Image: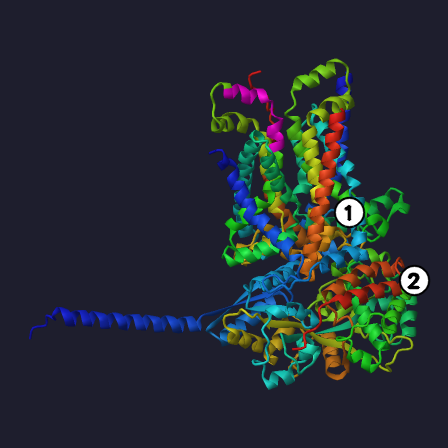
Amino acid sequence: MKREGIAVGRTALLMVMTLPFIYPFVFLVATALKPLPEFNQDSVGLPAHATLENLSAAWNEASLGPAIVHSLIAVGIAVVLNVALSSVAAFWFVRHRGRLATSLRWTLIATMAVPAPVFIVPLFVQLSAWGLTDSLVTLGVVFAAWNVSFGLYLMYTFIDALPHELTEAAEVDGANSFQLLRSVLLPLSMPAMATLAVLTFVWSWSDLLISIVLVQDPSRRLVTPATALLADQYSTDIPKNAAGVLIAILPMLAVFLFGQRFLVRGILAGVGK
Amino acid sequence: MLEALYVLPIVIVVGVALLLPVASVVAHSFTDWQPGYGSPWVGDRNYAELLQSDQFHQILFNQAFLLLGIPIWTILPLVIASLLHERVPVPGVFRTIFFFPATISPVVIGILFTFILAPTGPVNASLRAIGLGGLTHNWLVDERLGKPVIIGVLAWATLGTGVVIFAAALSGIAPELFEAATLEGANWWQRLRYITVPSIRSVIELWIVILLVTLFVGVFPWIYSLTRGGPGYSSTTIDFDIYQNALTFGYFGLAAAEAVVLLVIVALVVGGGALVGRARRSMA
Amino acid sequence: MNMNLTKGPRLALCGIVAVACLTASVALGASRSQQATELTVWDWGSPSPASMKELDTAFMKLNPGITIKRVHQPFNSYFTLLRTATATRKGPDIVENYASPAVFDYARALLPLTSYRTAAQKKDLVGWNLVSSSLSASGTPYAMPWGGQGIVMYYNKRLFKKAGLDPNKPPKTWKQFLAACEALKNAGIVPIAEGWKDGYGAEWWIDTLSSQYMSPSELATVGTKQNWRSPAVRKSLELLVDLSDKGYFTPDAEGIPLFPDTLNNFGAEKGAMAIGLAANCCNYQEFRKAKVGKNLGVMEPPLVPGGKWATQKLNYGPGLSWAITRWAKDPAAAYKFLTFLGTPAAQKMAFKSSTVFPNNVKTRAVTSDPIGAKILAWVATKPTYLGIMTLMRAPTEATLDKLVPQIMTKKVSIEDALKQIQATADKQPKIPTK
């Protein structure tokens, strides 16, 4: 009985804690559905005459359809590249602990500490000289590079925390490093890799500065820069702006919802004890 | 030796995309940098200008103040992830709700909160509605409140990511540990303190490092849309100042020097934190 | 006769045919590429894309060989993108900018227009001095000034009537202005819709108020010698703080930005007066679409107490500019487009579609809106001036904007604030002298 009481209390506490998160979301949706004249009179309440016209206006004005495709390409490349590079490199670093390797690891991880406004200008100048600007593929690679320091750190931490008996047992069985990586460590690292994939997706999708500098051709524009057009200094149409934001975040919420089951699998479930 | 192939791609990608530009920045911090054009050497003039400016001292103070948010930004997601790890209905739905802020671009979060915290916005309106009208403030334009409000908004924005990371870590702890503790009569708080935290210590450190780095290099989009660093310089952070100096004003040399100083500070803070962590661990 | 050609002549014939074909295709290709010039134009979405498209289409009809590719870049990233384009020397052929010394931040990227500008254009288009070296009309122009921008005050006739004020006789002197504010306040109406958070509202006030305290020589050099610690500027801020102390602005204005909240507030009739523009934004056309609609009135900003002018002048000058980048492949074609934009016909179109006031003195802009007509009449008849605000540059503006809320809430003294602003202004790179 007491157990159930605690469980109910726990759930109630969690529900209360979600309120500060639900409200802004509801507000965003309410604003997106509110006609502009109504918003100018009452910006806080629920819409009395909800309409879909803001959504379609935002969709058309900012060309959000193509923009979503562009974002999917660039961000998809970033996610695959980041997860692949980080996992494989983390595996290597876990097995190489020497002075040189550790210095290299810290140098790579230290690139997290470079603010985007700083590296974007020399990077852009160089990419421009090589003719690589306005390319979704280049952007994807840059996103990956920008996030790979975090990816390396995350994967290294997770792989390092795995029990050593597993790798020892596999090595005793004669597995080489590639088989070890593929058959033992990667499956066990699924929650970490899924987490990295989701975070890379979200961070790259919602980036503004790098996207807008590296892809200036409007026919290749990504989603977040496209919605920035609606949120301009001189724009007074807030409901349309909110509608753009709503459309922009829906793919990410979808990815997250779908990816949920990969994020928290019991790592040790099914492994021989 | 073939194993080196595992680490080569990452070195190449990071080397070209990040390390080379960083080297360029460091070199140019000693010049009057005009990207794409000749940049005359000025020695340490940029550094001198930076370190002598009152505004920079204010900015450093602001950054130090924001560090106070680290405990909040760590404990909240940890507690929530622990709660979700216990038997709760639809943990996935909860996680999605908490994660929603992470899907919104920081610039948009800034705009959203500018609205929510406006003088006639929902926060003040709710306070008035429940009779606490005396607590209403001009949240984003009061020098005393600027930084605490930013800590609050960052807590809101980063909570979901922390929950996701900690949830992944928690799922790796052997369930037997928890079962044994519960059988011995440990309550939720004791389980958290004696089993969870020690088991995922390295992930907690990871999260704190991420927070630190975000605080020093990734916070400028929030600052831009919430306060533009104002009123005055009371909410200006180093990375926002760098952004403004480089891209809004075109003072690239000064921004480069500032970026180098930032790198040094981050190295000191993270390095210092690591040393503290190692010392505590050897004492335990 | 035997028509079989022997090898040699056959080869020669093939060769001649081949060369002929080649020459023809090259000639055709060359002329086609001569005809098909594409000009990429960047703007930040104001004037509206729809109204600019009208102009683009009209130009392309007159110049079949030139295509205009217009790119709307988000305003908040626009100048960042200009900087990156400057660094790489690649990108657009034509860029929008303000008609002010702000243009010189990008002087490296902009093509001097001295050899392209005609004598007629120099005479007919107002504002060359603001985008030329040394801020002189005889200096080197880095852009072509386009469109006018003026500062006016809008008011709500219905709310005036409600407070017992004559809706057709808005206040002219400071005393009358204070009396009107007091009457509105007593009637429970917010006298002036205002917001200080982003600083722009204060900018417009300072421009109109401080200029009235300046001597003719100070006013004439307000661009080249920015003196923020001048008593004129200080007095204008003191007036604003006084108005604030008397409760004549929107409550908690320091937390409200001008864009878009203050403008929306005035439009929604949550304030009886608001300072606004006669330009492509924040203008009467926008307010006509809001609730204030047919109750809209326009007035001149009040005369300051102890000011130097007997009658009010009009704060008015060029607002925008178009520049050609140094890497543009076909500057002549680009300048054709600029020329078109500067013609009276184009400016008349722009005025009609998005209230871009003309800066070509030969334009006969027409409007059926009485407020628009009134402002046009002011432009034609009143002496105009430009204040310290119009001629400042980005770093100064950033410092000023962030200090405004603190000035209005008295957290920072006016003297202190002006000292900081002056320090920033002193640090800026000088205006080019050639």
Quadrant, the N terminus of chain C: bottom left
In the rendering, at what x and y percent does residue C363 appear? 64, 81
What amino acid is at disc 2? Asp
Q: Are both tags, 1 and 2, on one chain? A: no
The answer to whether residue C223 is left or right of residue C337 is: right
Q: Which chain carries label 2?
A: C
Q: Which of B129 and A113 is in front in this view?
A: A113
Q: Which percent across, then down, holds residue A249?
A: 62, 45
Residue B181 percent location from the top left of the image: 73, 16
Residue at (51, 75) in percent of width and height: C333
- Counting from the top left corner in percent of width and height, residue C138 is at 66, 83
Give the residue pinned by disc 2.
C245
Query: Visible in this render: residue A234?
Result: no
Name the one closer to the observer, A27 or A128: A128
Mark 1 residue type:
Gln
Q: Nearer the viewer, mark 1 or mark 2?
A: 1
Extreme residue in the top direction: B183
* Residue A242 image label: none
In this rendering, the count of numbered labels is 2
The chain letter under disc 1 is B
Residue B63's disc number = 1
- Picture quarter containing residue C112? bottom right
Residue A168 magenta-drawn? yes
User: How many C-alpha atoms fall within 10 Å of the one at disc 2: few (<14), some, or many (≥20)?
Assistant: few
| Residues under numbered marks 1 and 2 in contact, where contact means CB atoms less than 8 Å apart | no
Does the magenta portion include C95?
Answer: no
Query: Residue A212's image quarter?
Result: bottom right
**Magenta highlight range:** A156-171
Magenta highlight: main SS: helix
Report the side of A72 relative to C308 (left or right). Answer: left
Q: How is the image coloured?
A: rainbow
